[in-house]
Image: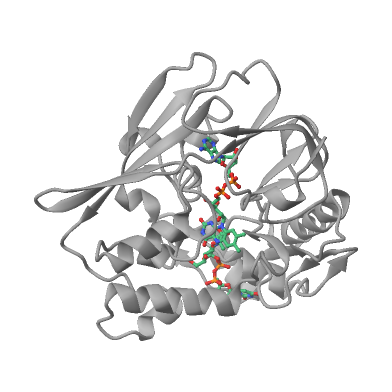
Amino acid sequence: MHNLQALHTFGLAHSAKRILPLGEGISDFGTERFWILGQGSNCVFVEDFDGVVVQVNHAGKKITELDDHYLLEVNAGEDWHSLVQFCTEKQLYGFENLALIPGSVGAAPIQNIGAYGVEINRYINSVEFFEISTGQTHRLSNEECHFGYRDSIFKKELFGKVVITRVLFSLPKAWQPVNHYGELAKLNSPSATDIFNEVIRIRQEKLPDPSVIGNAGSFFKNPLVSKKHYAALQCEWDQLPSYAVDQSSVKLPAAWLIDKLGFKGKKVGGIQCHPRQALVLTNDGTGTGEQLLELAREIQQQVNDVFSISLENEVRLVGKEGLITL
Ligand code: FAD
Ligand code: EPU
């Protein structure tokens, strides 16, 4: 059995039968139960996993300058933040709002990583992967990936069927800052480097560092509700913020809902609702999967009872046989 504590940022002390590093070549693991892993910053092993953990670590990148944009072909095992830093330093702009998001490049399209007004689908040209059952390689265009908020075809139809090997990004030479979100709005005509530095500053202030305390970022997704539902909630909660989505729905900050219910700082054993960011659950190193599920389910239940909103977990919870739901 192999301990998974150091292989996922939440750091629960669970194990897998075997760890299989997956480099450039295709390995035959398809007949065993498996879980594909990048840097484990969006996966939480809540039980011992009865199978093989396949770690994608194939690094390497190629950059081609074209007339009006740069084409970046980046292998799945590259570190996301290192890529953002490298591009910002080389004056290839666009990724700066997504600085300091932990994880691998291969996982970035899976939940369409996003922060501070930008989602990565804006810059994805296509995604390459191999199909586990056949070993055949394929490439999906941006449109074919069906990107949405924290969502893509890789979390749905293709979940558990493919290993992403390479992501192709297109960074236009004509760059405009995106600085409308939250504290970024204070910046006046910022450069990409200003945004990069400010995003890092805000994140270091607001989000707990997984190398200091175990966590997996936002535990829940921000829920979408109808405008009618939002209007009804506002009668009682007039401070409830919202983000525009389309004509009929809005997105609500789950952190605000959880905060209002008084969960900040609440502990179940070694698991805690973070005292500064209610959407993040942490593990002080002694927490267990059961304690995490207990606190997460309590939050989900109370948000449902009080606001009639059903929160969906953003993190992938992995049990004995694979993905589990809350
Ligand atoms: P993992 O956790 O290893 O895997 C995530 C999922 O992808 C799993 O289902 C796994 O099976 C699958 N997978 C991984 N690699 C591959 C592959 N090559 N092929 C097929 N499947 C694969 N996310 C945001 O969107 N925005 C944020 O602002 C943000 N902030 C965060 C802050 C903190 C402190 C932390 C800990 C996490 C944060 N996250 C955020 C979540 C996380 O950083 C992203 O989801 C990241 O993309 C996960 O990368 P990973 O390599 O760690 O993926
Ligand atoms: N808020 C509270 N209480 C809190 C924390 C926040 O009321 O304890 C309020 C804030 O005042 C603000 C709102 O909630 O009005 C939103 O807070 P914030 O800007 O911190 O963002 P978030 O909704 O908590 C989302 C993403 C993050 C991403 C940030 C910045 C999701 C699930 N989370 O967090 O992504 O970094 O916006 O764009 O969409 C992640 O996915 O793991 C992640 C960290």
Q: 150 left or right of 272?
A: left
Confirm whether residue 245 shows in the render. Answer: no
The quadrant of the image that shows the N terminus is: top right
Q: How many marks?
A: 0
Residue 292 spot, x, y in % from top left: 81, 55
Q: Is residue 260 left or right of residue 21?
A: right
Colouring scheme applied when the structure was drawn? one colour
Task: Looking at this view, name the residue that lies furthest to the right.
Answer: 269
- Residue at (57, 66) in percent of width and height: 253
Quarter occupied by residue 325: top right
Q: Residue at x 20, y 51 (%)?
A: 70
Drawn side of residue 147 relative to residue 324, left or right: left
Residue 238 in the image: x percent, y percent?
Answer: 59, 78
| Residue 207, x across and y down, in percent | 61, 72
> In the image, is residue 123 above or below residue 302?
above
Q: Nearer the viewer, residue 319 or 80?
A: 80
Q: Which residue is at the front of the view, 68 or 273?
A: 68
Question: In which quarter of the view is residue 92 placed?
Answer: bottom left
Quick check: 138 above or below 5?
A: above
Q: Is residue 14 above or below residue 190?
A: above
Query: In the figure, is residue 311 to the left or right of 268?
Result: left
Q: Quadrant of ligand 2?
A: bottom right
**Residue 105: % across, % down:** 45, 47
Q: Is residue 219 visible?
A: yes
Q: Nearer the viewer, residue 119 or 256?
A: 119
Question: Residue drawn at (68%, 50%), measured in percent from left and top?
Answer: 8
- Image quarter hosting the C terminus: top right
